[in-house]
Amino acid sequence: MAAHKKAQSRPPAHHSVGSRPRRSSTRKKTSRSGKRYWSGKVTRESHAMDLKQGVFTGSDPNKIARSVLASARRSHTRKTTPYRSAMSMINFYINRGGAGLSAAKKRVLERAKDALRRQAGKEKKPRH
């Protein structure tokens, strides 16, 4: 009886010798114009806190902080204190804006964080 020889595995013809085929990503692929991000889904579908529509579009840091803190206090689905939830929402919005967030808008939101600290009685104490 003749022993059967296993066929040698060769890379497909379109790959150069020694190269590996690309592994498919676990991420869903979408067209360039239809990029989807997890943060966008959170913004659209999350019910962690019901924020007032357009709360982050204003230019008054005190009003933004007051609105976000009030929403956090009303929410029954949050997992932490109202202050921490409110701060997380402002940080999330800043981070989601990324490079697309104008310097002026980022300044307003950073001031809103300071206003939130004041309104919640969490001001940082100066070090000596």
Image (tube, rainbow, N blue to C red):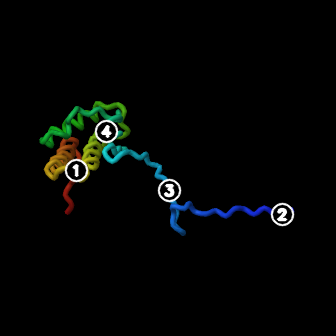
Residue 100: give its label: 1
| Distance between the alpha carbons at the discs numbered 4 and 2 | 66 Å
Question: In this figure, which residue is indicated by the disc labeled 2?
Answer: 2
Question: In this figure, which residue is indicated by the disc labeled 3?
Answer: 23
| Distance between the alpha carbons at the discs numbered 4 and 1 | 16 Å
Residue beneath the point at 35% across and 44% down = 36
Q: Is residue 29 above or below residue 8?
A: above
**What's under tag 2, amino acid-wise?**
Ala
Q: Position of residue 42 (x, y in %)?
A: 35, 39
**What's under tag 1, amino acid-wise?**
Gly
**What's under tag 3, amino acid-wise?**
Arg
Q: Are marks 4 and 1 in contact (CB under 8 Å)?
A: no
Residue 43: give its label: 4
* Quadrant of the image occupied by residue 60: top left
Sequence-first disc among 4 and 2: 2
Which image quadrant: the N terminus?
A: bottom right
